[in-house]
Image: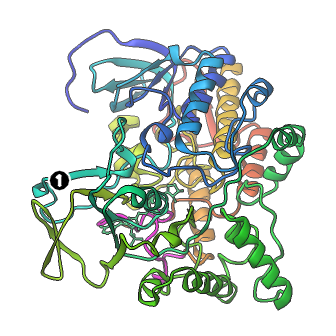
Amino acid sequence: MPDQPSIDAVETDALVIGAGFAGLDAVYVLRERGLTVRGLEAADGIGGTWYWNRYPGARTDSKAFVYCYTFSKELREEWDWSELYPTQPEVLAYLEFVARRLDLTKHFRFGSTVTGARWDDDTARWTVHSADGSVYRCSYLIAGVGCLSAVNVPRFPELDSYRGTLVHTARWPHEGLDVTGKRVAVIGSGASGIQALPELAKTAAAVTVLQRTPNYVAPAVSPEFTDEDRAAYRRDHDEIQAFLRSSPFSQYLKSAGPSAKAADPEERAEVLARAWTEGGLGMLMATYDDLLVDAESNEVVAEYIRQKIRDTVHDPATAEKLIPTTYPFGIKRPPGGVGYLETFNQPNVSVVDIAATPIERFTEAGLIIDATELEFDVVVLATGFDAATGGILRLNIAGRGGLPLTEVWAEGPSNYLGLAVPEFPNLFTIIGPLSAFGNLPSCIEHNVEFIASAIDHARSIGGPVIEATVEAADEWTTSARGIGEQTLLTLSTGQAASSWIVGSNIDGRKPSTLYYLGGANTYFDLCDAERELGFPGFTFIKAGDRVPAHAHSD
Ligand code: NA7
């Protein structure tokens, strides 16, 4: 942590970092449990990922009525979603509404980037510094920084020499970016690039997609909700929540059967056709259960999508460039395209395979590929995020004796239930690494309830210090890694394509297991059991007791 001027620290029971879905929920729940709570947020407003990702076309890939908070009937009754997969302005407006309705904004300091946090055994408190010079001391430090918040800007040679407009999808200008009549390059074909392209191509003179790896893009069909639809999702709320709780992805999508390869071919054709027509995450989550564990089953669905790309894209050479052949479907989180494939039928849209002919370097006017300079007025980096650990590690957290979290996670994250790390007492990470891979608001709510219960428990026994045991964390980390190895995302055989789900999308980052892939439903069961059993994977150290160097459960 850099030297900071000595100023009075703000004292609070809990400090929450982030004002997105996670941070808002944590501030609300902890406040309601009687703690004093402060929040720090780097952005100038509420919203987290929905504050930053203002690129045209940004929208959810989870259904609106599950991509929201469930803890408050009032919020549910008072907010009307307009369509199935709402766009960024609507989700941001929702979060602003929540903050207003629950009176949360007053707890946050905005424009305040955390630069370091350090645990002190003597006082059993965290000291947290922010770039704006403010200092906080708290018993509980809650990182609600999101799993896709640390922006990835690849180190393209001579990127700095480019004089045109350079913009990352996750740092889109608030005032918008008019590309009318402009020559635009889009680097990246993940969800962000796939959502942005059709919008940019509406007005740009030309859009060139610089694609390193083609993606399995299914349609995202987002019908507008009628009043009847809204009445139905409100009426069915309990049933929907029960369904989510039992779903491996905590999504409102029903599997069609256990195995794609074993399914009756006629029935399977119907299932795939329905999933394609309905769009969204359905190709992965509303077809067959074994797509991420059985290569043959996966290939059935992968080939179906490949054929759809051939059917949709008129120019066969372009279609072939857009067809993924080197990795299984679902290894990258499947993006939904609103007219994405169809956009390549427009005369102003083209794709360049930069795996075959890489970007050699940037120039003042554009970039060089295959010894040829391509000139662009605007370059859009849709190059994603340093997922799961990036946002947390950027906080510069130091635990017992100044132990840096970067050191502990040098070979990949380790923790208990994705929530807590030994040697880092009273630090909780909401949707941290090795937590469930599911609908994020569902996972966030579950995590926040767990954290609040652990804090309640600590307070009830007069012991403010909570720490995951080494044994529990080792067991959890080994289990999460083992489950990862049983999927097609496995790292050990080197099969995994570049994917943020294992961190292999970042140049120079060592890939590792970043999520618990045993199912969100199983993850929730395990967290619930931990809570019901009185938190056996944690130590609770009573006030006044000396914290041992290595806390164990015995
Ligand atoms: P993604 O899904 O990680 O996609 C990033 C894209 O950028 C992907 O096509 C990458 O190619 C490409 N990329 C990244 N680094 C480079 C370099 N160095 N050179 C060329 N191309 C590069 O991020 P998104 O923002 O689209 O989506 C992230 C999640 O947000 C999404 O899954 C939703 O859950 C919401 P690659 O495939 O690695 O070859």
**What secondary structure is found at the residue carrying circle 1?**
loop
Place of residue 335 in the rendered image (x, y in percent of width and height, measured from the top left): 55, 64
Residue stretch in magenta: 490-508
Report the quarter where the C terminus lies.
top right
Position of 450 with respect to 366 (left or right) is right
Place of residue 290 in the rendered image (x, y in percent of width and height, measured from the top left): 72, 77
Prevalent SS, magenta region: loop
Q: Is residue 356 above or below residue 417?
A: below
Position of 163 with respect to 286 (left or right) is left
Position of 99 with respect to 318 (left or right) is right
Q: Quadrant of residue 266?
A: bottom right
Q: Which residue appears at 71% of the width and 61% of the height?
A: 519
Q: Residue under circle 1?
A: 164
Please name the colour scheme applied to the rendered image.
rainbow
Place of residue 343 in the rendered image (x, y in percent of width and height, measured from the top left): 47, 69
Q: Three-letter amino acid code at disc 1? A: Gly
Residue 212 appears in view: yes
Q: Which residue appears at 82% of the width and 38% of the height?
A: 227
| Residue 115 vs residue 408, the one in the foreground | 115
- Of the four image quadrants, the one with ligand 1 is bottom left
Q: Residue furthest top?
A: 8
